[in-house]
Amino acid sequence: YTDATVANGVLYFYKVSATNAVGETADSGLATAYPSAGVPGAPTDLVADTTSHLRIDLTWNAVPGATSYSIQRGTVSGGPYVTIAHGQGTIFPSFADTGLTSGSTFYYVITASNSIGASALSFEVGASTLPSLPSPWTYADAGYATTPGNTIYAGGAFTVQGAGLDISGFANADSFGLCYASLSGDGSIVARLTGRSNYSGLHKSGLTLRESLANGAKHFTTLFNGINTNSICYRTSTSGSSTTSGSASVGGAFPQWQKITRVGNVFTGFCSADGTNWTTLGAITNTMSTTLLAGLAVTSRNNGALDTVVYDNVSVTGIWPPSVATNSVPLTATVAGANLQLSWPADHIGWRLETQTNSTAVGLRTNWFTVSGSSSTNQLSLPVNQVNGTVFFRLAYP
């Protein structure tokens, strides 16, 4: 069927049904069409939101008459840009740019297209990925897909954001944010939960030793309900339901200390108001892998919202905090667009990055100052100083 009665610039909706001597079928699904005499207008209201260390999310307004969108990305404001995706946003005008470099700034423009051609470029927007976590830590959304969370490490504290519906879900129903490192053999994880924000009212947070990120993985977890109660939760069979027990209150709301120990296959959970006097929440035998994910967990129990919890005084046997090497090492420097990427060995976390802008005639011995946050990481991305071409960096300890 050809509809020759339409007008350009009007959105039309179509459904089809079939008939015979007996009767008529139900309607088909809905189809739309937008006849156009020219190319679409440029997309408007492009927004770039930082989601994590590796991801930036884009949204924009749908353009009448557009059948697809192309996303272009650059590392310098104003371009040049490289097309990274085409045919996006046909249902929802959005795009997730993943696999990016931590601590870097990216710039985006998009075009709208139809059968006639492509629009002009949208206005440019920019966003920066979060700085990378110190080795050996990483972040992931555990269990089934949820609103993406993230973790920032600064000043000795991990700020963890997570959505999802539960840390201790029923079989195959786990969904939460997790900042973790790998722990092999016997050991412990200890941390103080210092506070929260964006509280959903259903919040859970705590420490966990877990076989994997998968739904239904075996685990042993200490939970804080966000109000005044600590408990332990565990799953002893893959894809089985979790069991919660051993609740205790040690001083009301934040801060709360928690600890998990593993000796063989015996796991014990503790809570404390001061990190010195510990209350045992319970101990169970749980046959789990030799190497587990030792992590800091949070769930908002609201799949569309992120809750935030800050953990400090974090300790994982043999892993964290790292011992600080005292030998001098060189800085590694590379230029990525408008940013200078500086890095140094992970065993030198605790050293501070210092900088100064003396001219070579004045010399390098004075006016050094510390780059904020540098002592808690081993890599930084800094904007290139286009005004002063003589900028010096060094590592210093203690």
Image (cartoon, rainbow, N blue to C red):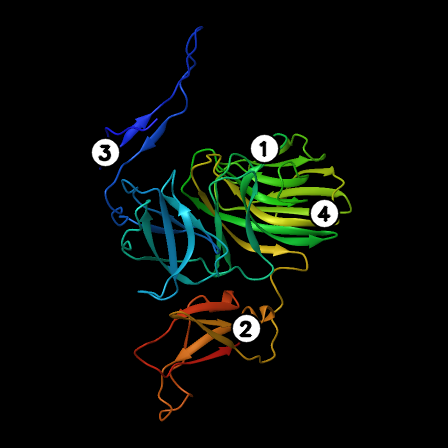
The reply to whether discs 4 and 3 touch (Cβ–Cβ < 8 Å) is no
**Residue type marked 4:** Arg
The answer to whether the residues at label 2 and label 4 have Cβ atoms under 8 Å apart is: no
Disc 1 marks a residue whose amino acid type is Ala
- Looking at marks 4 and 3 on the same chain, the residue that comes earlier in the sequence is marked by 3
Q: Name the residue under label 3.
A: 10
Q: Which of marks 2 and 4 is nearer the N terminus?
A: 4
Residue situated in front as seen by the camera: 360 or 19: 19
Q: Earlier along the polypeptide chain: callout 1 or callout 4?
A: 1
Q: In the image, is residue 15 above or below residue 282?
A: above
Of mark 1 and mark 3, the one earlier in the sequence is: 3
For disc 2, the neighbor class at 10 Å (few under 14, some 14 to 19, many from 20) is some
- Quarter holding the N terminus is top left
Say which of marks 2 and 3 sits in front. Answer: 3
Residue 274 appearing in the image: no
Query: Of callouts 2 and 3, which one flags the residue occurring earlier in the amino acid sequence?
Result: 3
Q: Which mark is residue 262?
A: 4
Q: Which residue shows up at 61% across the image and 73% down it?
A: 325
Task: Choose mark 2 or mark 4, whichever is in front.
Answer: 2
Which residue does the image show at 40% across and 69% down from the upper left? 337
Q: Which one is earlier in the sequence, the residue at label 2 or at label 1?
A: 1
Classify mark 4: residues with Cα within 10 Å, few (<14), some (14-19) or many (20+): some
